[in-house]
Image: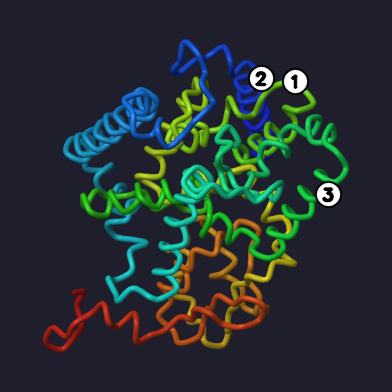
Amino acid sequence: MRARKRIIITSIVCIALAALAYFAWLFPFYEFETNDYTTSLEKLRSVDYLNTLVPLLIIIALSAVGIALCVWLRKLMAKTDKRYSRFADVRTSRTTGNAPKQKPAVFMIVRWIVMIVFSFVMIWGGLIFGLRMSSISIPILSCPWNTEQMTESSCYYLSHLNELFELPIKSILIFMGSTIGFTILLGRAICGFLCPMGLVQDIMDKIRQKTKIEGIAMNEKMYGALTPVKWCMVLIFVGLCFAGGNFCNFCPAVAVSPILAGISTSLYVSGFLMILVLMGGFFKRRLFCTVCPLGYLMGLLHKISLFRIKKDCQACTECGACYEACPMGIKMIYTERGKADVTDANCIMCGECVRCCPENNALSVTFAGAKIYTSSREKIMSGYKRGGNHYVRK
């Protein structure tokens, strides 16, 4: 009965999302009188650039209102319902998923620098530096409407295969070669290090931490509930090119890269979804990454990626800190007791599992077999100070 119920619910979700995707252009979020896909340095310095930013500013404002409303409702429910209050204490990051504050690792500093620099280059690089790397494509959700990017994004042609095969053979080979090459070289580290949508979600998570608002620590059942959504997104991403639809009207990245680059492009369902991405990323780190279709397709090649997550099962004490810290909800890192390689198709190589692991060398991030970031008890203990006969968090 449970399996049948799950199949029915998944089918309903698939049909609803597919219908929404196919008729995405019927739900305008913000429309410009004329879509202007040209941009220049002069335009970035003009008042017209502020007009271009209007839909993004509306999205940010509506997201802030939605977040404030969710926080108010949560406090109201906790105040009026004691049962919910106890439930919330268990489910939020106030009691789970938080590692003690410790000195930032070089790996984490590098990751943030690369994310910020690459997002800047992808959005404004071609415009500012005047450099384009021909047809080289990186498989991330950086919107192809922004033609001034230094490199192309694979997502457009992968969701518009009919247009891909209309290109000259040379262009197709360069596209496929660069896309597959980057995927093998980096795997889903592209999501953790390069994707502008990932940076946006990480910034929302940092804002939540600075405002000291409780996040949501999801459990295995909650992650399982997102699986049908992920598969629906994958089917929509791959299938719309055959059904005659346009995934760009459905993709939240349209509300970020082209608008920041000064392109006046109308938003449809993508505008509504971007609000959900910002709100979801605020309460649950990298929520959109758990259902991102392009990220999952890249993850299918994780077996041959040069980035790996390795585990010393003898050093592991099964504390579960890695599972609580993982923004993608990968349980195998915690449960695996035999294999050294615990790389999963959903892993974005953010290093959070390694950062929160309290055992020396129990977990490590490797590149081409070389360890570049390992867990350390000393680093964990740097977040504590002695208080009498025991240690407390600083």
Q: Nearer the viewer, mark 1 or mark 3?
A: 3
Q: Nearer the viewer, mark 1 or mark 2?
A: 1
Quarter-wise, where is residue 2 in the image? top right
Residue type highlighted by circle 2: Tyr
Question: Judging from the image, what secondary structure is the residue with disc 3 in?
Answer: helix
Tag on residue 22? 2
Q: Nearer the viewer, mark 3 or mark 2?
A: 3
Which of disc 3 and disc 1 is earlier in sequence?
Answer: 3
Distance CA(mark 3)–CA(mark 2): 30 Å
**Residue at 28% in and 49% down:** 208
Residue 157 % position (x, y) = 72, 37
Image quadrant in which you'd find residue 332:
bottom right
Residue 218, percent from left and from top: 44, 51
**Residue underneath mark 3:** 173
Q: Which mark is residue 244?
A: 1
Is label 1 in contact with label 3 (beta carbons under 8 Å)? no
Q: Compared with residue 201, is residue 74 higher up or lower down, i.e. above or below?
A: above
Query: Residue flagged by tag 3: what amino acid is it?
Result: Leu
Q: Indicate whether 298 appears above or below 106.
A: above
Marks 1 & 2, CB-CB < 8 Å contact: yes
Q: What is the spatial separation of the Cα atoms under label 1 and label 2, in whole angstroms?
A: 8 Å
